[in-house]
Image (cartoon, coloured by chain):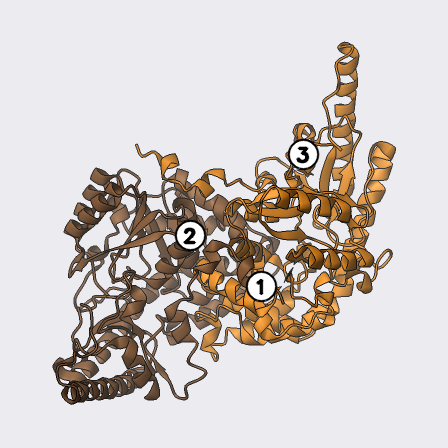
Chain colours: A orange, B brown
Amino acid sequence: MIDYDGCFSSAARTMQASAIRKMGGLGGRVSDLISFAPGFPAPELFAWEEFRDVAQSVLSGSDPSVLQYGSTRGYGPLVEALAQILSERGIAATPEEILVTTGSQQALDLTARVFIDPGSVVLVELPTYTGGITAFNNAQATLVGVGQDSDGIDLEDLDRVTVRERAAGRRIAFLYVVPNFQNPTGLLMSLEKRQRLLEWAARRNVLIIEDDPYGALYFDDVAAAGDTRPIKADDRDGRVVYLSSFSKTVAPGFRVAWVAAPTAITAKLEVAKQAADLCTGGLDQRIVYEVWKRGVLTARLPKLRSHYQEQRTVMTRALRRELGNLVSWPEPKGGFFLWAAFPERVNTDALLTRALARAVVYVAGSAFYVDGRSSNLARLAFSAPSAARIEEGVRRLAAAVREELDVSTSSVLATPGAPGRPASP
Amino acid sequence: MIDYDGCFSSAARTMQASAIRKMGGLGGRVSDLISFAPGFPAPELFAWEEFRDVAQSVLSGSDPSVLQYGSTRGYGPLVEALAQILSERGIAATPEEILVTTGSQQALDLTARVFIDPGSVVLVELPTYTGGITAFNNAQATLVGVGQDSDGIDLEDLDRVTVRERAAGRRIAFLYVVPNFQNPTGLLMSLEKRQRLLEWAARRNVLIIEDDPYGALYFDDVAAAGDTRPIKADDRDGRVVYLSSFSKTVAPGFRVAWVAAPTAITAKLEVAKQAADLCTGGLDQRIVYEVWKRGVLTARLPKLRSHYQEQRTVMTRALRRELGNLVSWPEPKGGFFLWAAFPERVNTDALLTRALARAVVYVAGSAFYVDGRSSNLARLAFSAPSAARIEEGVRRLAAAVREELDVSTSSVLATPGAPGRPASP
């Protein structure tokens, strides 16, 4: 028998499976499961008819390059389109500064490989997106968390942490932030804070990786397009690497996303991508391009925004009704997620067992914290289930929470002086 | 101005662009270029009509999972189909041992990350596939070359190199081989040598990465299906990681390939893939699966084989006619490539300038050697150009070779005693 453990690289030995992906695998095993776990877009909003139309025309065979190996940089017309899409977001980027990636996850991975040496520090928000955590971890980064305020990253904590890490002789590879409707908190970084963050980055000479999958999906009742202006739009120094994606606005099955960065960085990411997968799928890129070119994408955005806004309303009302003040959250102004805080003695890792017994699932807050904390927090994705399923899922979740509270109360009563299960902030 | 060089990881600083991809970029810049450079399949053989049919049905919208985030492991029915395809090649693999990848390049990349520590030795054939070289290089492997005989890798050299590297205290991550119609040489490893290689690997406890993109494309006039039996088929110990792809048999634009390996390895590759791109494209996987399920793939294979066989014949006849005994090659028994050897004083790196001036291009042998050698060798891909273009391309190439020979002869004559440009074997 071969000792496979002995065969693996040290990076492989510390690789961790994604907590969200694990939750995603439960669907088939729990009957009638309602899942608030993965950030899936609503498939009934996909432009199926237009996809069929486009597929017919691009698969005519008249352009053989559609299914041939393509340029690593990306399908030319799509790259040009991205320059225009970026320009509408306030970002001036030439085609040389743009790279198409196989989903934003690949952009995170390439970024990790191009900037991180084993032991390099990557600064992340507390909490932050698990896909970033796994990509940076796999490159053997040391992930260091920075607190958040209601308007985004805590700049004082950021500076304190940066000074501390550098004083300890560690190299800071970059800061990773998700300013628009952050995953998992749904927080929107204020425009003023974005400016101050850029000034701070210049002063401390730190690169910023800005991940923006949700910017186009703001909720009209509490936010506007102007609130989502990317940090990259005001990046005069060329220290921001901007990531965005069509997964939430067209469909994730196409695996088409992109990076905009200074040419020196884009060129390096391109070389890394050559070895990672040669090129992004040709059919996928053409479908996304044609959907954009025909105006389908732009026309659908208001529908997507109002749909997800309504989903959020359904979830927040159901939570208030079912749990009253046993739950609170920062108001999501866009995106897919609600960051729920239960009473402190509810540990959401422990609660999962009860929730699963009632056929509802979420992602426990611990998945998003790089400091190892367990907590009373949970990410609830309201994007994919129907309104009726959201209502029912929240009822199940509320029952699980009340049960957990009953048990923890009685166990405290039964064992005088024993603390409830500790929960971090 | 930011010092980007100072921002990059040490891995990024040594990343090298693929020589083949560079050649691929010339098409737009040289008018009427005939390219023998990239190993492109012939797009007129793609099943365009069936792709359109399948796209219509899978994009009906009745199955929303088509365009949703998918399982990292791969689309379930496709994984089951792969088990059957593997079984037809003599490989018994359960679905748990199979992972769908975004092209074989991703499989090479994941393999690199899972097995290679910086400085680990990867044993490769001299010459070997550039995509393997770049993936292993990016993981900071030390690539060590092993000679080849006409029937594949030189087992004595392999053992000598292995003993030498281990004696020097270096860890051997794996041996990388392409037994069927090797890229770039077109060589077919004999069945007897495959057995001896397996025995050697067991004796020396070395993992084997077997890359098999071309096995289904043998040429009936000189080979048979039985000659392509994968090494993995006889792997009783679980020390072979087998890679294959639909890029050459369906179309590369779909980016669908796979790995078969012991479950402990597949599980690790899957975790690495989560962070690399979450999942392979959903539409791409379904089209490939449906094409297989409908029998289109199996029915087309004989056509593909006879087409590429005819392409080979056109190229070999043209070379013989245009260059006589100024060129030789090992007979390609399948695949896409002819490995041409010109007279020793023709250096194929230098020849490229003359070839480009005549609007023909190939990949110089130096791209495939990890020992830095330049040589009189070139990889000529006969897979994509039409017969007429192959004829014309060979005429242009022959003219370039004759010109180079004239110049090197006259320069030797003009400078008595001065050697011609040295060429390695």
Q: Which marked residue is nearer to the observer: mark 3 or mark 2?
A: 2
**Label 2 is found on which chain of the structure?**
B
In the rendered image, which residue does mark 3 sit on? A359
Q: Is residue A328 left or right of residue A81?
A: right
Nearest to the observer: residue B106 or residue A232: A232
Q: Position of residue B300 (x, y in %)?
A: 34, 67
Q: Which marked residue is nearer to the observer: mark 3 or mark 1?
A: 1
Q: Secondary structure at mark 3?
A: loop
Q: Position of residue A349 (x, y in %)?
A: 67, 31
Can residue A138 be seen?
yes
Label for residue B139? Answer: 2
**Residue type marked 1:** Asp
**Residue type marked 2:** Ala
Q: Position of residue A303 (x, y in %)?
A: 77, 62
Q: Residue at x 17, y 69 (%)?
A: B331
Looking at the rendered image, the quarter that the C terminus of chain B falls into is: bottom left
Label for residue B124? Answer: none
Q: Secondary structure at mark 1?
A: loop
Q: Quadrant of residue B264?
A: top left
- Do the residues under discs 3 and 2 have CB atoms within 8 angstroms? no
